[in-house]
Amino acid sequence: MSHNTDADARAAQAVVTHHRQLAAALTGHVTDLVTAAETGGLRQVWQHRDALLGWLHTELLPHAYAEENALYPAAAARPEGRLLVDGMLDEHRTIAALVAELEETSAPVAAAAAARALQAVFATHLAKENDLVVPLLVAAAEVSLADLLDGMHDLIGGGGQEGCGGHCGCGGDVPGDRSVTVSV
């Protein structure tokens, strides 16, 4: 791969920007669900839970799987990245387990608790990706982050608010948008 510092810097910024949008959308969905659980409106709880689950299945989980295919192999190939990637994959499994817990619960408090736990795990996960994985790849002379992300819509965003439920605030301005969807 060729290493283009400007392209890699733009790609890194696009990933971090998209992560910020994902976190904002998740926070909005979780806040809606927790608020509904606190006020006791069962219909609203399940509506917000279903909206959150829809977003998780169309946005967050495809993003995680795209990372596993695009970024993680290159990071794991570096000696300093192998254990980090193992931990990141464990966190993806934890996120998927929390999504399953959210799907299976029939109690509003349990749904709110699972959603909040998912939000906390995701926040620490994104911090590691932004602060450890992305810089590791940008610093690797033999890796081009821009090339790794070529066509990876689910990692850098789709240029709009599709699937965010109005929570992301992205305004459709996602640098590096390639408008290609990754199949999972």
Image (cartoon, rainbow, N blue to C red):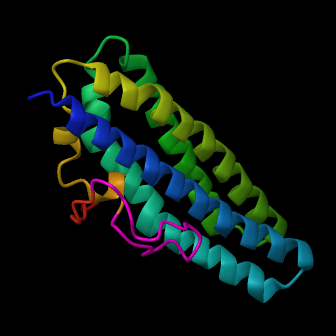
Q: Residue 104 versus residue 40: which sits nearer the camera?
A: 40
Please tell me which residue is depicted at 23% across the width and 66% down the height of the picture.
179
Quarter of image, res 83: top left
Q: Residue furthest left?
A: 2
Q: Residue at position x 39%, y 54% from top? A: 63
Residue 24 position in % (x across, y down): 60, 59
Residue 171: within the magenta?
A: yes
Measuring from the top left, give residue 79's x and y in whole percent.
Answer: 32, 11
**Left or right of 79 in this view: 172:** right
Residue 98 position within the rendered picture, expressed as x and y whole percent measured from the top left: 61, 53
Q: Which of 182/140 is in front?
A: 140
The x and y percentages for residue 1 are 9, 29
Q: Is residue 21 left or right of residue 117?
A: left
Magenta residues, start to end: 158-176
Q: Residue at x 65, y 69 (%)?
A: 29
Front position in the image: 55 or 106: 55
State yes or no: residue 169 in magenta: yes
